[in-house]
Every structure is written in C-alpha cells, then in structure tokens.
Image (cartoon, rainbow, N blue to C red):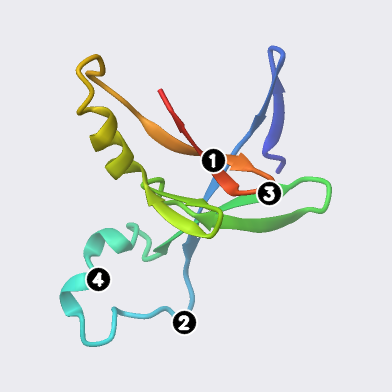
Amino acid sequence: MSVDRFYSGYNIKFILLVFAHSFLKFSGYFNRPGSTTEAAFDKDGFFRTGDIGLYDSEKKSYKILGRASVDIIKSGGFKISALDIERILLTHDHISESVVFGMEDPTWGEKVRYK
C-alpha cells in the first residue's frame, strides 16, 4: 500500500493516525481513573496513541512523525499555543475569524502561520 498518490496534477501524502493493540495494552493511567475514557479506544479495542505516522512506499516502512495535537506549535524549542495566538488575533477590530497552525520549517521545526 502506498500513501503517496498522484491525482490530477497534485502529489498527495496521506498521514496516518496511529492505533495500538497488544497484550501489553494498558487499561488506564496510574491513579488517574478519570483520565482514561472509552474514547481513548476504538470499537475493536485499539488504543488511540495520539501519534501520526507516514508510510514510506520506497522503504516499505512506517515512520512516526509526531503528535496529532494541532493546538500546540513546536518552534525553536518552544511550545506555542495556537489557540492563544487566535485569541490575540481576534482582539483586533478588523479580524472576525482566524485559524493558526504550524508549518514545517527546517530551522525552527515549525513556523506559525495564520489565515
């Protein structure tokens, strides 16, 4: 299975959500029973790890890219809240909506982008 596909002039890369199922699967966080909900597991008992991965069709292997949380932008060793930046942008009189996200950057890891 290749996740790199060519559609009508676009090279598309499919990102995979990582689920785990094993006899080593944990049943919950230690001394935090309310922190683990049924939503952490899918209908087949696979645990949603919160990681995202990519299938490399040339090497026929999977690579873990990082966490699925898009609310945190990692830039230059700092963790930046996209929601905090959106709140600040929305205080401007001429901005009624905004979206903030991290874009891959070779120097900083991610750079803050907004629309």
Q: Secondary structure at mark 2?
A: loop
Q: Residue furthest front?
A: 92
Instruction: Classify residue 97 as left or right of residue 103.
Output: left
Q: Which residue is mark 1?
A: 111
User: Is label 1 or label 4 in front?
Assistant: 1
Residue type highlighted by circle 2: Phe
Q: Secondary structure at mark 4?
A: loop
Residue type highlighted by circle 1: Lys
Q: Is residue 4 depicted above or below 35 in this figure?
A: above
Q: CA distance from mark 2 to mark 3?
A: 24 Å
Quadrant the C terminus occupies: top left
The disc placed on residue 36 is: 4
Q: Residue furthest bottom?
A: 31
Q: Is residue 17 depicted above or below 25 in this figure?
A: above
Quadrant assignment, res 8: top right
Q: Position of residue 48 (x, y in %)?
A: 40, 60
Residue type highlighted by circle 4: Thr
Q: What residue is rendered at 49% in x and 76% in y?
A: 22
Instruction: Classify residue 21 as left or right of residue 39.
Output: right
